[in-house]
């Protein structure tokens, strides 16, 4: 079931990391036709494969089919992800949706539409898998309940994204620039994400338990046993709830919530029906162990750790995607094709990073936290025998092999064997606690090191050098394909200037002006270069700066163009004119007003000093 979490997050990454072209390459009816045909083919293939597996089940029996069933579920889920990616990248369906006004204003709506499509693919899989699942595990639930249970169990993983995205949409609709600027900065995005992660971790359980349809446990005897055990362990909670997952026929329990006011103890009807009172207490002791060992808090840290890793790796992954596009070169890519290629490579790298982190890092801690919760039983009971017998009942009732592990749990046999070791020698308990703390220490040290490296790559000189070099190579490649495009030469000049190469920047700007003498951006940027280079530099040329800036200002009254003109007047000693022009620039500026204020103060100070000097000379 936890694999569904990964599928949903991967689908979300595919959609959110995709950069659609300005205009889709296929007509809408063509794209929609391909979408419908591929969806029908996927449904037909899924039905055929599970029907064949059901026929085999009647011939060879459940034990031989169980592994094949799980493998087929995984393969079809991966195929659904692939089909979803085709919808996004090849058919470019998102481009049509984003052309709708309300979706352009609220991008979260578009994402929800496509996530609904992905959920539809998964529902096809679960609906056709039902017969085999029921014959293997004898759950007794209906096909409808099986599909709905899979959906409702997995959907809460999207809750953090939904809240983040919806609030971000609301902020972008506001008429205020400050919150938008904060949200568009790297630091603002990190702070925003961490804030919401914390808020959702605190208040999310209250929403999730309602979404799952949980109800307070009414049965007096089991409720009293659970209350007494929690009281002995010193664990407070909001409520003990019946968890109706998969029709309540699974023998399982859970705990939600970081703080007691929003903490819920969950038990399924099957657990209360099939386990003895001591076995029920043993399962609750396991859940209490998660609370006492702060596992839920550590999971929050691990989620935040993924944010740090994604931030640290993002520039490297983006540089890699761009460099892959450079290497691919003029391999028949049109401009939209190049953008899609970069988007695909970047998305694949991000998904790979996500899978590696959650499968191996997060999965490692989940498995070992489960074991740590298992051995917490010794804090509340003299023996782990009730928990061992519970594991045996779970294996028998589920029909799954006790030897079968997964990425987030050790196998039932492995868990039983470790408990038996602890029964014989309690030193194994201390050994596992020590293993956990060493692992957490190594993780945190590695996370800090990676975060430091990522910060330097993103903000430091090394990162700027790498990004500048790659950007320069991309523009040079595009110029080789379109050498008469002045805009590309201006972009090349900007990049070279940002890399402290004024000689090459001047050459690029002059090339652009030779093609388009009235190119405002080339005029403005070359004027700025001439005006702001150090006075000892051979490129410092106040006269040329003012000529170019005046010509640019004749064509445009944008704030940055007026700012360059004011700088031109300033370096030529015409301070009053500089002040007058900068006032116009500042009044027109909507963003970065602090820069215009600093400029205006600089010009006013020079004008005052000039006036003071003139008064003394008289």
Image (tube, grey):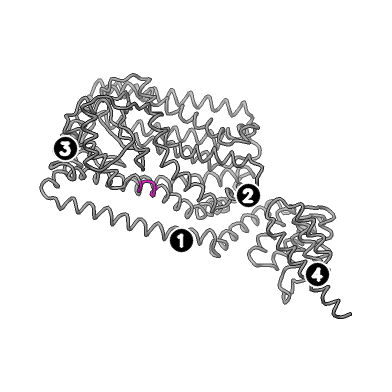
Seen in the picture, residue 46 relative to 566 is either above or below; the reply is above
- The one nearer the camera, 169 or 306, is 169
Looking at the image, residue 204 sits to the left or right of residue 192; the answer is left
Q: Are marks 1 and 2 in contact (CB under 8 Å)?
A: no
Q: Position of residue 182 (x, y in %)?
A: 58, 50
Q: CA distance from mark 1 to mark 2?
A: 28 Å
The local secondary structure at tag 1 comes to helix
Mark 3 or 4 closer to N-term?
Answer: 3
Crowd around label 4: few <14 · some 14–19 · many ≥20 (10 Å): many
Front of the two marks 4 and 1:
4
The local secondary structure at tag 2 comes to helix
Instruction: Give yes or no for residue 300 being in the magenta stretch.
Output: yes
Front of the two marks 3 and 2:
2
Q: Which residue is mark 3?
A: 388
User: What segment is highlighted magenta in the picture?
Assistant: 297-302
Q: Main secondary structure of the magenta part?
A: helix
User: For residue 569, what is the image quadrant?
Assistant: bottom right
Q: CA distance from mark 3 to mark 2?
A: 58 Å
Q: Position of residue 462 (x, y in %)?
A: 53, 64
Q: CA distance from mark 3 to mark 1?
A: 45 Å
Looking at the image, residue 157 sits to the left or right of residue 492; the answer is left
Looking at the image, how many numbered discs can be counted on the residues?
4
Q: Which residue is mark 4?
A: 607
Mark 3 or 1 closer to N-term?
Answer: 3
Q: Which residue is mark 2?
A: 178
What residue is at 29 percent from the left and 43 percent from the top? 291
Front of the two marks 1 and 2:
2
Q: Which residue is mark 1?
A: 452
């Amino acid at each position: 079931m936890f694999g569904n979490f990964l599928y949903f997050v991967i689908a979300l990454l595919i959609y959110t990391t995709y950069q659609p072209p300005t205009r889709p390459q296929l007509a809408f009816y063509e794209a929609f036709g391909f979408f419908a045909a591929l969806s029908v083919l996927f449904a037909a293939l899924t039905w055929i494969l599970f029907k064949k597996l059901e026929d085999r089940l009647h011939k060879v029996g459940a034990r031989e089919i169980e592994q094949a069933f799980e493998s087929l579920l995984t393969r079809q889920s991966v195929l659904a992800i692939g089909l979803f990616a085709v919808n996004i990248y090849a058919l470019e369906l998102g481009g049509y949706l984003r052309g709708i006004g309300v979706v352009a204003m609220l991008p979260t709506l578009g994402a929800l539409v496509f996530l609904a499509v992905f959920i539809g693919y998964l529902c096809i899989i679960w609906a056709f898998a039902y017969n085999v699942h029921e014959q293997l595990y004898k759950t007794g639930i209906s096909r409808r309940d099986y599909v709905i249970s899979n959906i409702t169990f997995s959907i809460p993983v999207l809750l953090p994204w939904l809240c983040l995205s919806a609030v971000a949409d609301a902020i972008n609709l506001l008429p205020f620039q400050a919150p938008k600027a904060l949200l568009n900065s790297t630091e603002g995005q990190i702070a925003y994400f961490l804030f919401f992660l914390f808020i959702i971790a605190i208040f999310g359980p209250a929403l999730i338990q309602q979404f799952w349809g949980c109800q307070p446990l009414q049965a007096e005897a089991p409720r009293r046993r659970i209350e007494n055990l929690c009281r002995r362990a010193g664990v407070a909670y909001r409520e003990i709830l019946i968890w109706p997952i998969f029709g309540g026929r699974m023998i399982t329990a859970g705990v939600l919530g970081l703080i007691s006011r929003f903490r819920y103890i969950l038990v399924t009807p099957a657990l209360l029906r099939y386990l003895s009172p001591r076995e029920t207490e043993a399962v609750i002791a396991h859940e209490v162990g998660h609370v006492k060992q702060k596992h839920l808090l550590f999971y929050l840290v691990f989620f935040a750790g993924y944010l740090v890793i994604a931030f640290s790796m993002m520039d490297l992954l983006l540089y890699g995607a761009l460099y892959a596009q450079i290497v691919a070169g003029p391999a028949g890519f049109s401009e939209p094709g190049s953008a899609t290629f970069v988007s695909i490579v970047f998305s694949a790298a991000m998904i790979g990073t996500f899978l590696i982190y959650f499968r191996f890092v997060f999965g490692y801690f989940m498995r070992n936290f489960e074991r740590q919760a298992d051995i917490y039983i010794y804090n509340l009971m003299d023996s782990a025998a009730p928990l061992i017998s519970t594991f045996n009942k779970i294996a028998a009732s589920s029909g799954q092999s006790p030897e079968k592990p997964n990425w987030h749990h050790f196998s039932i046999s492995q868990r039983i064997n470790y408990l038996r070791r602890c029964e014989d020698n309690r030193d194994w308990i201390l050994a596992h606690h020590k293993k956990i703390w060493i692992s957490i220490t190594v993780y945190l040290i590695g996370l800090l090191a990676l975060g430091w490296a990522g910060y330097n790559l993103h903000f430091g000189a090394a990162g700027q050098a790498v990004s500048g070099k790659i950007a320069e190579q991309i523009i040079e490649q595009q110029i080789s394909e379109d050498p008469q495009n002045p805009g590309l030469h201006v972009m090349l000049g900007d990049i070279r200037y940002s890399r402290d190469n004024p000689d090459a920047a001047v050459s690029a700007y002059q090339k652009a002006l030779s093609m388009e003498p009235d190119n405002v951006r080339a005029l403005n940027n070359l004027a700025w270069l001439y005006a702001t280079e150090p006075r000892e530099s051979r490129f410092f040329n106040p006269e040329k700066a003012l000529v170019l800036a005046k010509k640019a200002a004749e064509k445009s009254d944008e704030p940055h163009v007026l700012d360059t003109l004011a700088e031109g007047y300033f370096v030529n000693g015409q301070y009053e004119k500089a002040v007058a022009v900068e006032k116009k620039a500042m009044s027109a500026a909507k963003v970065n007003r602090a820069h215009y204020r600093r400029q205006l103060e600089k010009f006013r100070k020079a004008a005052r000093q000039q006036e003071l000097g003139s008064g003394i000379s008289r």
